[in-house]
Amino acid sequence: MNTKKRLYSQTNFNHDEPKCKKMNKSKEKVVQVCGGHGHILILTQMGKVYSIGRNDHGQLGSGDNINKLFPFLINSIYFNNEKIVQVCCACNYSMALSQNGHVYSWGYGFNGRLGHGDESNKNVAHKINDNFFNKESIKLISMGLFFSFALTKTNKLYAWGENCDGQLSLGNDIDQFKPMLVDSNTYNNECIIKIACGHHHTLLLTKKQNSNSLTNIYACGSNYSGQLGMGITHDINLFQPIDSNYFEKQKIKDIKSGGHFSFALVETNNSNETKIYSWGHVGIGRMELGDSNNKNRPFQMDSSLFSGKVIQISNGSLHLFAITKQQGSNEKKVFTWGGNENGQLGLGHFNNHFKPIEINMNCFKKEQIISIDGNNSSWGNSFAVTKTGKLFVCGHNRHRELGFGHRKNINVPQLFCPDLFGNENKNSKIYNNQSFEDIVIEYD
């Protein structure tokens, strides 16, 4: 095994890199990753949150505005020492959900996107006032480019932040500086399974009360590319259902919203088959339809483009992923398509792909991928989490958010900070907020 050593000096980092402090401890297991405008949040199995990259608005939660070139462990005191179970980040701001159902946010406050009742920036995590949620416990959070949603354990939906396109489903286009209760009649009082936010539009996946088989999709917000899937192209400021006939009244398993497009994973009567439906902006993997028009209602993708049953879908703002499982085995494959100007597809080049193409699994060093996702804020990053808690990354790296110390975009999945994340017990490095001298990072 060859080991490459990269030496970085203080002048290389332009004085914005924290000191590397080596500690004797077990590696952390990654369970979730999300990307914003040049910054990344990493959630571990222990409920710890790490941040890296751009920090001009305090979006890393480090108490300053200094960029971080290596993972920064956010002090748990700012989360009131609560275990974090979900993280989100978008355009220069971040959010976290605790095991106790509390929501924390930090970073850029413009449009009221932090939900604290004002537009001030926060460079450390602040808990959103429980009174804004009527003191109810939150079980799910979701973020668009400049707006956010939170779902309570009693199925109440709250929204705040930018609302210029009606994406908050409040019946108006007024920005909201604190969480506002969304009228449940707009989604027919159905149980919300998932919230999927695009740049300026929102989807809900719901099911009928006391039913596990009947599912619906509701949509609102920006619709100039047809991303709401209703056969129209004007904006809608209250949730409305997408006609289930478009999905042949089959059970919808998952929904996703990209920058200006949407798609859904649908179950069929055949246990070995699923279908993908997509709609919205044509430039995002819709060229297999043979035309160049945006699609304002769902169209089924050609299942023959994939090998095996699609079990998971995900996306960035301009690119998409599908994980498939081969019939009669546990073998999984990863397919990708869409925009690739930053190498976010992980194919070893920077050319766009308008049809799904398989990623070489050797890139992941024979690790089993359990989830893969893209940065849905703007610039294209991609993140793959393995069964052993390792993290592979590729794509945009101009803010050095991928942890390699340089600004070059990366077009093949690379192991992210292997000295810190994974299941082996070796020396790992924790990075604090002090100045530094020369350090050597080793990658296998």
Image (cartoon, helix red, strand yellow):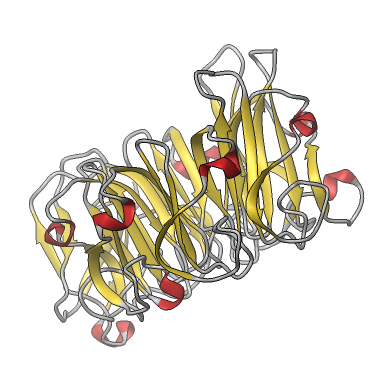
Across and down, in percent, residue 428 comes to 17, 53
Across and down, in percent, residue 126 comes to 23, 65
- Reply above or below: 198 against 115: above
Where on the picture, by quarter, is residue 340? Answer: bottom right
Across and down, in percent, residue 282 comes to 80, 56
Left or right of 235 in this view: 58: left
Q: Residue at x 60, y 59 (%)?
A: 171
Closer to the camera in the image, 208 or 96: 208
Across and down, in percent, residue 286 comes to 79, 49
Residue 360 in sight in this render: no
Left or right of 233 in this view: 6: left
Left or right of 331 in this view: 121: left
Q: Residue at x 36, y 81 (%)?
A: 56
Left or right of 115 in this view: 228: right
Where on the picture, by quarter, is residue 325? Answer: top right
Q: Residue furthest right?
A: 291
Closer to the camera in the image, 184 or 47: 184
Residue 68 in sight in this render: yes
Q: Residue at x 72, y 40 (%)?
A: 242
Q: Residue furthest left?
A: 24
- Reply above or below: 111 against 102: below
Q: Number of marks in the image?
A: 0
